Amino acid sequence: MCGVSDTEHTPDETWDRLSSMAGEIHILKVETDGEDGLIVTFSDGTICGYVVEELLELRPIREAVEETAPAAD
C-alpha cells in the first residue's frame, strides 16, 4: 500500500526530511485487516497496510533480564 520514493537523497537531506516529518505527522487510526494485518491512517492522509510479522521485525532486539527479588528488611 505504501510507496517508497525512487528519489535519492544525501543522509543529511534524508535526516532533515524525517526529523521534520516526525514532529508533524501522527497516527490517527489503526484498524485490523484480516487476521494478521493492520491498516494505519496518518495525519498527512497517508494510509499504509502492515502485516504484524513485518512490525515485529522492527522491534529492537532485547535480551532477557533476570529479575531479582527485593531484599527483605
Image (spheres, grey):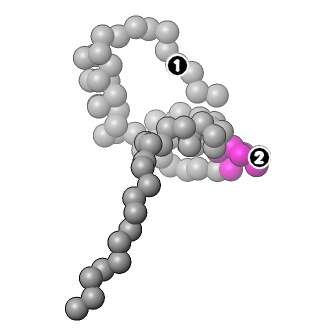
Residue on which disc 1 sits: 4
Asked whether, in this view, residue 40 is left or right of residue 14, the answer is right
Going by the image, does 15 lie left or right of 65? Answer: left
Q: Are marks 2 and 1 in contact (CB under 8 Å)?
A: no
Residue under numbered circle 2: 34
Q: Which amino acid, mark 2? A: Gly
Expressed as whole percent of the image width and height from the top left, the position of residue 56 reads: 56, 43
Q: How many marks?
A: 2
Residue at left offset 43%, top offset 42%: 60
Q: Residue at x 40, y 8 (%)?
A: 8
- Which amino acid is tagged 1? Val
Q: For label 1, count other residues whose C-alpha is less than 10 Å away and answer few (under 14), some (14-19) or many (20+).
A: few
Quarter of the N terminus within the rendering: top right
Q: Residue at x 49, y 9 (%)?
A: 6
Q: Where is 2 relative to 67, above or below?
A: above
Helix, strand or loop at mark 2:
loop
Separation of residues labelled 2 and 1 (CA atoms):
24 Å
Query: Magenta stretch?
Result: 32-38
Extreme residue toward the right, this view: 34
